[in-house]
Amino acid sequence: DQQVKQNSPSLSVQEGRISILNCDYTNSMFDYFLWYKKYPAEGPTFLISISSIKDKNEDGRFTVFLNKSAKHLSLHIVPSQPGDSAVYFCAASASAGGTSYGKLTFGQGTILTVHP
Amino acid sequence: SQTIHQWPATLVQPVGSPLSLECTVEGTSNPNLYWYRQAAGRGLQLLFYSVGIGQISSEVPQNLSASRPQDRQFILSSKKLLLSDSGFYLCAWSGRASGRFYNEQFFGPGTRLTVL
């Protein structure tokens, strides 16, 4: 049972344009969401996160939107740069009650390619 | 600042041989520690997590085991490797404050394991 899904395996965007990466989840207990960026043969790098009490969080060129009713979140990158080309993973945590021990459930990833 | 180390970076092992991968964290105390595996073309699968010395929780049944002999050391082992154990192994840590665990996890550089 895939509780976190990234239905687009890949996305291609022109430099300077907006990149929108999508993620859906099924577990209503998830209340904290994160995005990671991963280059080949390296560990994932934390990008941005959002708590379920918010619907938007912004950090520089990166903005994450959360739609709890649709169980959907998205990562917007504006403007996109060639260096953003990587695999992007969304992840979710059910932290209510403090017993999750920070365990994350990851999506399958989306390969973003930004063309110069 | 905190850093996380993993070694070796790459490993080629024959089927049936033992395995030991090591992960150490610097700059923090009493972290949560995690082992993940990324199979080719797949997302990150949580294998084990630890909330303290000697405390190991397994997420999936498998041919692997984990140990935490020291606060900032996490070891992934196998007595006899299978072909299906090939993959990219990642160690991660997360911090805590006031008894609650932070959701953000920070990953090491990973170990590429090939079982032949």
Image (cartoon, grey):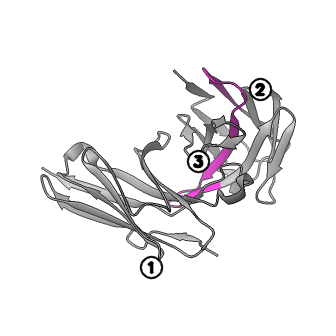
Question: Looking at the rendering, which quadrant does residue B14 occupy?
Answer: top right
Q: Looking at the image, do the residues carrying marks 2 and 3 touch, with CB atoms under 8 Å apart?
A: no
In percent of width and height, residue B100 lies at 68, 43
* B110 lies above or below A64: above
Q: Residues within 10 Å of mark 2 (few under 14, many from 20)?
A: some
User: Which residue shows up at 77% across the image and 59% down it?
Assistant: B60
User: Which residue shows up at 64% across the image and 26% down it?
Assistant: B25
- Which amino acid lies under the numbered mark 2 shown in the image of this protein? Asp
* A94 lies above or below B37: below
Does residue B15 appear to the left or right of B111 in the view shown? right
Q: Is there any visible trace of residue A3 in the rendered image?
A: yes
Q: Earlier in the sequence, mark 2 or mark 3?
A: 2
Q: Nearer the viewer, mark 2 or mark 3?
A: 3
Pick the residue in front: B5 or A70: A70
- Looking at the rendered structure, whether the residues under marks 1 and 2 are on a common chain is answered as no
Question: Which region shows up in magenta?
Answer: B22-45
Under circle 3, the secondary element is loop
Q: Residues within 10 Å of mark 1 (few under 14, many from 20)?
A: few
Q: Which residue is mark 3?
A: B103
Q: Nearer the viewer, mark 1 or mark 2?
A: 1
Q: Which residue is mark 1?
A: A70
Q: Is there any visible trace of residue A36 in the rendered image?
A: no
In percent of width and height, residue A42 lies at 47, 39
User: Which residue shows up at 62% across the image and 38% down it?
Assistant: B94
Q: Write down the chain letter for disc 1.
A: A
Under circle 1, the secondary element is loop
